[in-house]
Image (spheres, rainbow, N blue to C red):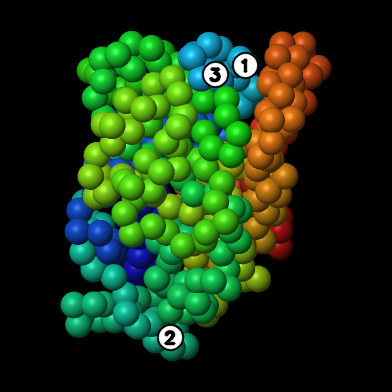
Amino acid sequence: MKVVVCGAGLTGLTLANRVSTLGGEVVLLERAPAPREQGYMIDFFGPGHEAVEAMGLLPAVEEIAHPLAKADLVDEGGRRRATVRPGQIARGPLLNLMRPDLERVLREHLPPAVDLRFGTTPVAVDEHDDGVRVTLDDGTALDADLLVGADGIHSTVRRLVFGPEERFLRLLGFHTAAFAFESPRIHAQVRGRACLTDTVDRQMGFYALGGDRVVAFGVHRTPDPDLPEDPRAAVREAYGGLGWVVPEALDRCPPPSEIYYDQVAQTVLPRWHRGRVVLAGDACYAVSLVAGQGTSLAIAGAYLLAEQLARTPSVEDALARYERLWRPVAEEKQRVGRSGAGRFVPATKRQLWIRRGVLRLSRLPLIDRSVAAALTGDSPSLHATLHRAESNPTA
């Protein structure tokens, strides 16, 4: 089987690895001219953790982790107001990772047979009875048994095959940004933990990396769905006026090309596949950063798709089983994300006080479990999903 995968992010890299390892031929396309360095810290646990372990990559992933003992919500003077502990996010193993680092590990462990091409993207997709032809922006064409759109919430494959982006994006009313900078002072204050401003309508978080390097991560409410032309100016405007270490971080904000900036959105489609084209990861089931586990679900979903392609006699049946098995998992996480948006970035001081009080009470065991469920929902098991697929072929 020959598979063209569009998007060399976490979803595409995982899928390319598994399809190639299981005997398929893979061409992996990425529209960016080189690997992206912009990104943010993620809490990595659940089904994605199971997937990288099954792929034999867990030791390499553990090497890039940044242990964080807790996440503190702090006021304008840097005083702690509430704390979130790792056990409130995940009941199993949890790793704190920079997203670009995780992509690098997956990229470095691609099987040699994978044909990885940067700086190219599809411009046309033509399906026929037993395959698909993908025309690229350099004028060349690829014939394959399957095209996978793993190219994120702004998916080119989805636009070409399923329709315009606005039909499938569910905007949640936030923008998000992340950037890295060097500051010995801020690094010393946040080392070993995450620190987030306990603020209304906007929030900045900080994590310490190696040396004096710090990552700033922001989320803010906005009624404007459009992305700004100048992300640096937008970041400074959105978070200007916040106290503590925020002014210094904004002064050290790098050029726009070094800033990650995007909408906070979910993707919702009535079907994830059409003929010999299928979507994966954020292209079809983005849960958004307010839901958590987006990276984990993307990696696990790609692993599941590859397994179904290898185990199912026909491509059509494999795509149908992949969607039947994974859609309920993704939709539940999307529901958790929508219901928890107010807790993630409170819109009023009253919501802020309620969140602070709940987190303080979470030291009690019963309330702690309730808080964990509200923060992330249930953590689905990839192994259980695969077992269900094996034991019930019609699942």
Of marks 1 and 2, which one's residue comes earlier in the chain? 1
The residue type indicated by label 2 comes to Glu
Disc 3 and disc 1 in contact, CB within 8 angstroms:
no
Q: Distance between the residues labelled 3 and 1?
A: 10 Å
User: Does residue 14 appear left or right of residue 143 in this picture?
Assistant: right
First reached walking from the N terminus: tag 3 or tag 1: 3
Q: Where is residue 124 in the image (x, y as percent from the top left)?
A: 35, 83
Residue depicted at 34% across the width and 68% down the height: 4
Q: Where is residue 315 in the image (x, y as percent from the top left)?
A: 51, 71
The vertical placement of 258 against 214, above or below, is below
Q: How crowded is mark 1: few (under 14 residues within 10 Å), some or many (20 or more)?
A: some
The image's mark for residue 129 is none
Q: What residue does disc 3 label?
A: 75
On screen, residue 88 above or below 377: above
Q: Name the secondary structure under disc 1.
A: strand
Q: Which residue lies furthest to the right in this view?
A: 366
Decide: is 221 above or below 161: above
Where is mark 2, residue-wise?
Answer: 127
The kind of residue tagged 3 is Asp
Between residues 295 and 197, which one lies in front from this camera angle? 197
Crowd tier of the residue under label 2, counting other residues whose Cα lies within 10 Å: few below 14, some 14–19, many 20 or above: some
Could you say where residue 117 lies in the image, as x and y percent from the top left? 21, 62
Label 2 near label 3: C-beta < 8 Å? no
Callout 3 environment at 10 Å: few (<14), some (14 to 19), or many (20+)? Answer: some
Question: In the figure, is residue 91 to the left or right of 186?
Answer: right
Q: Is residue 201 left or right of residue 14?
A: right
Quarter of the picture containing the C terminus is: bottom right
Residue at position x 28%, y 36% from top? 253
Q: What residue type is labelled 1?
A: Ala
According to the image, label 1 marks what residue? 82
Q: Distance between the residues labelled 3 and 2?
A: 56 Å
